[in-house]
């Protein structure tokens, strides 16, 4: 059984380039779209606030393998080089330098945890951990916090993702 990792990340787009950034993403190169798909990413979305805050989300079976695939892709390298000027304070390629946001709430996981007997919740919470390549939903379901307050106490590390 393959588990799904959910990855959320953020970057900052230069405010004076917001309209052009939106236009570029309305017509992403077809070969870049195919590379993202071939990397194993699905349900991929970008959200852009008026102040330039960019939040991205995707699901994959293996975030590390997806990153490796895109890091070796000539198409992704060309796309990222072409898009580099859009980002504020970026050290390197956007797909390799974005900040991952830790997941602090997941309705499905909490509902599942709430439906389990208390002994299973406590046991699962004590024995599982979080991976480094996004949220693994099979691990997370077993380790879902017992309360909303515990869920909101989750802290994560920065990691890389693709824009």
Image (spheres, rainbow, N blue to C red):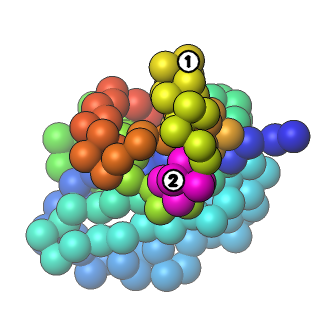
Give the side of residue 13 with respect to residue 123, left or right: left
Residue 150 percent location from the top left of the image: 30, 40
Q: Which mark is residue 127?
A: 1
Q: Answer yes or no: is residue 152 visible.
A: no
Residue at 68% x, 47% y is: 4
Residue 152: x and y, percent? 27, 46
Picture disc at residue 114: 2
Q: Is residue 110 magenta?
A: yes
Quadrant where the N terminus lies? Answer: top right
Which is nearer the N-term, disc 1 or disc 2?
2
Q: Are marks 1 and 2 in contact (CB under 8 Å)?
A: no
Name the foreground residue: 79 vs 108: 108
Relative height, residue 31 to residue 148 (above, below): below
Q: For the stretch drawn in magenta, what is the main secondary structure?
A: helix
Residue 55 in view here: yes
Quarter of the view holding residue 108: bottom right
What is the span of residues highlighted in magenta in the rendered image? 109-115
Q: Is residue 53 left or right of residue 35?
A: left
Q: Left or right: where does residue 121 sit relative to residue 36?
A: left
Relative depth, front residue between 26 and 82: 26
Identify the disc placed on residue 32.
none
Q: Position of residue 153 (x, y in %)?
A: 25, 38
Q: Write the residue at 47% across / 74% down.
A: 25
The label nearer to you, 1 versus 2, is 2
Residue 4 counted in the magenta span:
no
Residue located farthest toward the right when viewing the structure as drawn: 1
Q: Please, what secondary structure does the residue beneath circle 2 have? A: helix
Measured along the vertical axis of the image, is residue 61 above or below residue 128? below
What is the distance, in whole Å, between disc 1 and disc 2 at their CAs? Answer: 17 Å
| Disc 2 crowd, CA 10 A, few/some/many (<14, 14-19, 20+) | some
């Amino acid at each position: 059984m393959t588990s799904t990792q959910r990855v959320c990340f953020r970057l900052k787009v230069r405010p004076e380039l917001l309209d052009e950034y939106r236009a570029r993403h309305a017509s992403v190169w077809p070969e870049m779209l195919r590379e993202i798909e071939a990397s194993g990413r699905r349900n991929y979305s970008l959200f852009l606030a008026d102040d330039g805050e960019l939040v991205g989300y995707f699901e994959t079976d293996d975030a590390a393998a997806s990153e490796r695939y895109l890091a070796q892709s000539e198409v992704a390298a060309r796309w990222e080089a072409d898009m580099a000027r859009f980002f504020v304070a970026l050290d390197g390629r956007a797909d390799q330098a974005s900040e991952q946001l830790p997941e602090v709430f997941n309705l499905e996981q909490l509902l599942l945890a709430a439906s389990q007997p208390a002994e299973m919740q406590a046991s699962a919470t004590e024995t599982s951990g979080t991976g480094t390549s996004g949220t693994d939903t099979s691990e997370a379901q077993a380790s879902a916090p017992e309360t909303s307050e515990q869920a909101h106490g989750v802290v994560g590390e920065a990691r890389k993702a693709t824009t």
